Amino acid sequence: MHQMHQMIPEEAYHKASALGKRIPELEGILIKDACFSYRYAFFVIEGIFILGEPAICKDALYSYWYAKDVIKGRFISGEAVISKNARYSYWYAKYVIKGRLPDFMHNQMILENNRYTKDYVNFIQ
């Protein structure tokens, strides 16, 4: 008996990207992956992809990019994961918030005490 191929998020993204438009029936596949949810939002929808946010907010890099490139402002759901990475926290402060991080992220950044902490402190002064 012939078994149907299960599409993976990468394939769903490439199909939507090739068509250059939102494909609602593929979104259930895309939401399983932070990378392809972000790419779908940025390159295909060119806007917020609420269904993909639960996957995106589990990944610091894609949360930062989603905030910067798609929302063009704070992505509150992604801040917890961003705060675990000093580099992305610094970039989030500099390029998204354009100022001091929210208190819990600020405190985490100060505790990191690394190169990005120094850059962050210099930036917010």
Image (tube, rainbow, N blue to C red):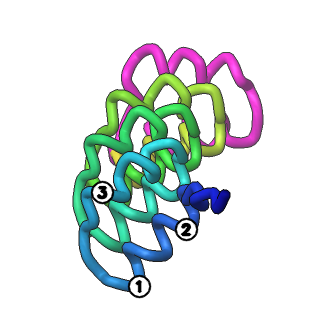
Q: Quadrant of residue 120?
A: top right
Q: Give the magenta-colored segment's residue range.
A: 97-125
Q: Quadrant of residue 2?
A: bottom right
The residue drawn where x is 30% and y is 39% is: 74
**Gap in angstroms between the C-alphas marked 1 and 2:** 10 Å
Counting other residues with Cα less than 10 Å from the Cα at mark 1, is it few (<14), some (14-19), or many (20 or more)? few
Q: Is residue 78 above or below residue 9?
A: above
Callout 3: helix, strand or loop? helix
Dot 1 or dot 2: first in sequence order is 2
Dot 3 or dot 1: first in sequence order is 1
73 or 52: which is nearer to us? 52
Residue at which label 3 appears: 25
Q: What amino acid type is highlighted by mark number 2?
A: Glu
Left or right of 27, for residue 85? right
The residue drawn where x is 37% and y is 23% is: 102
| Image mark for residue 11 | 2
Q: Nearer the viewer, mark 3 or mark 1?
A: 3
Q: What amino acid type is highlighted by mark number 3?
A: Glu
Dot 3 or dot 2: first in sequence order is 2
Q: Position of residue 59 (x, y in %)?
A: 57, 39
| Image mark for residue 18 | 1
Point out the image quarter for the N terminus.
bottom right
65 or 20: which is nearer to us? 20
